[in-house]
């Protein structure tokens, strides 16, 4: 058996230098992990906590006091975040459209990104130029499009989405995609029943604990000093992974690039934790389990400030032979043996998925809910639609039998991954802008006038075409080819053999596995293009939509739902503009000119 030694790349992982730039203001009482990336003008208030992997990129990001931003979140653009706010793992917040748009504009006034005091944003949520009031609770994996306005004291259910310019009034309970108001003038009893907490009470406890931590000299910046690692000699841990706490890793297990493990964590033999995955708290993961890219597993409601709230499973147990697909968020929930969870999905506090059960893509299991043995559940909230499922049914839905994929990938996986990490055939055009904290590994080819933003990870055989844009915390694993003047926005994982055409618009939080994306096509906010799916030329996969394995979004159609179904046909440029709030086909070349001009001007300097 091969033997490996975990040697973290401390120079790459320590991004403290980026917070020294002009325009960065951080209160001395704030806890900032040294791995956090900064670009532009950022102001962080007193007694805030910012965990590892977080990215700030903007010309005016203001964070109030006593706010917590959890691991691998990305904040980009101009925005104001209030006091006593909690932003979950893998969240992406973007400032929105700048106004006075090119083409036939639908937004002559710039969008605003605002989060009011006392609001909680659940993990995996993505937001475009969205305004959210005070004391509002947003669930797991929500998606808010341009100029969404959500009032004070609202509850937005797990997996909900909005369309451009949508308004949700104060004191509303809203759910669905697009979200509909289910109840108005809700009181605290209904809030507690709907989400299990009152945001203002939670954040009051968090504020007390943050201040107490400062007085005790505790900080996320020095948590790693108490780390105890028990890594089997045959396990491979990537040098860009962060391990802090009491961590045990079994034989032939892989912890891949950008992964963050913080807490008391035990991972069994023959398990694979993929790129940019976050595992926090008291977590046990069994043997022969696959955790794909951009997954978050959080053992409690508020780990990191030690605030536990009722209903959370703490500790978390994930069984053996489990398959958790990309961009899934688990918090305070457990999975038994041989469970499969599809892309862009979630399990909420206190939920349990029993042996052999399957969760569909873009689905969320509700808090304190159980999914029975060998059943298939789908939707938001996930409901059982099949019982006594077979491997043939699993293959028809996911495109593979999970246990067979595990069998194929396990032999010598640690040795193979270690060998792959040695390949560094990197070809980058000199007229390319690469921001801080970007990792290249494998056979990489980057074309002219490409902009690669903070925290992107490239592993495998990856080609990015002329004048394309790769935003914050995007990751590539496998064989991926991206065309010219294509935009890949924040928090997207690409896995396997993927082809993305010219002029495409791959939106924030989308998940793409072994899929083909045609010219001028789009996969929208927090949507999933699953194994061997096809998005044809000028087709759109709508926000929070599951294009399942082998599925096709045909040319000039728009598909929506779980699973995807055709809702619009023969969409022309104007139709696409109305849906997106901007025309991607006009926007991508126009922004490409700005990228080219910026790169040329920097070279002159």
Image (tube, grey):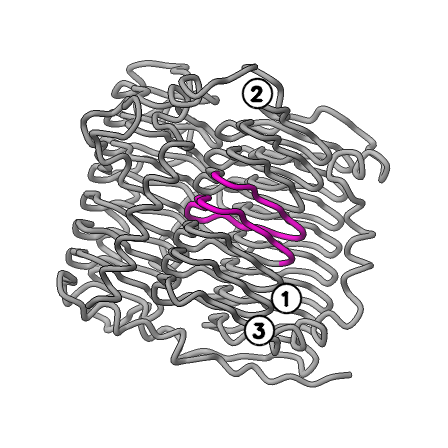
Give x and y (percent) for residue 149: 27, 25
User: On the rendered structure, is 215 left or right of 124?
Assistant: left
Looking at the image, residue 12 lies above or below residue 114:
below
Label 3 CA crowd tier, 10 Å (few <14, some 14–19, many 20+): few
Q: What residue did someone put label 3 on?
A: 425
Give x and y (percent) for residue 145: 37, 29
Judge left or right: residue 422 versus residue 139. right
Circle nearer the viewer, 3 or 1: 3
Residue 541 sits inside the magenta stretch: no
- Whether the residues at callouts 3 and 2 have beta carbons within 8 Å, the answer is no
Left or right side of 385 for 539: left
**Mark 3 or 2, nearer chain start:** 3
Residue, disc 1: 267
Q: Quadrant of residue 501?
A: top right
Q: Residue 493 in magenta?
A: yes
Q: Which residues are magenta?
A: 478-503
Residues marked 1 and 2 touching at CB (< 8 Å): no
- Residue beneath label 2, please? 557
Give the CA separation, mark 3 to mark 2: 39 Å
Residue 62 shows up from this direction:
no
Give residue 410's quadrant in the image: bottom right
Where is residue 90 drawn, in percent x and y? Answer: 43, 50
């Amino acid at each position: 058996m091969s033997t490996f030694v975990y040697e973290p790349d401390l120079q790459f992982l320590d991004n403290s230098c980026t917070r020294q730039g002009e325009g960065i203001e951080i209160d001395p009482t704030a806890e900032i992990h040294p791995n956090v990336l900064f670009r532009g003008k950022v102001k962080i208030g007193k007694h805030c906590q910012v965990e590892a992997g977080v990215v700030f990129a903007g010309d005016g990001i203001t964070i109030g006091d006593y706010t917590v931003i959890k691991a691998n979140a990305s904040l980009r653009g101009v925005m104001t975040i209030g006091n006593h706010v909690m932003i979950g793992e893998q969240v992406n917040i973007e400032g929105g459209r700048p106004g006075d748009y090119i083409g036939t504009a639908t937004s002559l006034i710039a969008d605003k990104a605002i989060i009011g005091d006392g609001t909680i944003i659940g993990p995996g949520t993505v937001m475009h130029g969205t305004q959210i009031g005070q004391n509002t609770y947003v669930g797991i994996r929500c998606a808010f499009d341009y100029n969404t306005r959500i009032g004070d004291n609202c509850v937005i259910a797990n997996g909900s989405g909005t369309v451009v310019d949508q308004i949700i009034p104060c004191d509303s309970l809203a759910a669905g995609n697009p979200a509909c108001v289910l109840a108005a003038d809700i009181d605290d009893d209904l809030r507690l029943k709907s989400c299990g907490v009152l945001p203002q009470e939670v954040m009051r406890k968090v504020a007390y604990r943050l201040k107490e931590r400062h007085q005790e000299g505790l900080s996320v910046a020095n948590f790693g000093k108490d780390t105890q690692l028990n890594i089997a000699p045959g396990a491979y841990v990537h040098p860009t992974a962060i391990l802090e706490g009491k961590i045990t890793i079994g034989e032939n297990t892989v912890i891949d690039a950008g992964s963050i493990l913080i807490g008391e964590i035990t991972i069994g033999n023959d398990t694979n934790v993929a790129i940019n995955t976050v595992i926090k708290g008291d977590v046990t993961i069994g043997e022969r389990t696959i955790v794909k890219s951009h997954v978050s597993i959080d053992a409690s409601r508020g780990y990191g400030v030690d605030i536990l709230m009722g209903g959370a499973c703490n500790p978390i147990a994930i069984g053996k032979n489990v398959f958790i697909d990309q961009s899934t968020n688990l918090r305070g929930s457990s999975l038994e043996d041989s469970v499969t969870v599809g892309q862009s999905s979630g399990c909420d506090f206190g939920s349990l998925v029993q042996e052999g059960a399957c969760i569909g893509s873009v689905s969320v299991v509700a808090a304190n809910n159980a999914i029975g043995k060998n059943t298939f559940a789908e939707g938001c909230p996930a409901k059982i639609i099949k019982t006594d499922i077979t491997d043939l049914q699993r293959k028809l839905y996911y495109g593979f039998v999970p246990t067979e994929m595990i069998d194929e990938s396990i032999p010598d996986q640690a040795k193979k991954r270690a060998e792959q990490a040695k390949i560094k055939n990197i070809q980058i055009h000199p007229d390319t802008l690469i921001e801080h904290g970007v990792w290249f590994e494998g056979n990489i080819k980057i074309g002219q006038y490409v902009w690669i933003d903070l925290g992107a990870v490239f592993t495998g055989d990856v080609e990015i075409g002329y004048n394309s844009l790769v935003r914050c915390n995007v990751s590539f694993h496998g064989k991926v080819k991206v065309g010219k003047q294509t935009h890949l926005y924040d928090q997207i994982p690409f896995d396997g053999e993927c082809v993305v055409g010219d002029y495409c618009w791959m939106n924030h939080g989308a998940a793409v596995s072994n899929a083909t994306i045609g010219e001028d096509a789009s996969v929208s906010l927090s949507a999933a293009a699953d194994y061997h799916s096809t998005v044809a030329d000028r087709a759109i996969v709508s926000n929070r939509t599951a294009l399942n394995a082998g599925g096709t979004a045909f040319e000039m159609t728009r598909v929506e739902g779980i699973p995807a179904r055709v809702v619009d046909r023969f969409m022309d440029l104007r139709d696409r503009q109305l849906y997106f709030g901007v025309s991607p086909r006009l926007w991508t070349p126009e922004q490409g000119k700005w990228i080219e001009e910026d790169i040329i001007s920097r070279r002159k300097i």
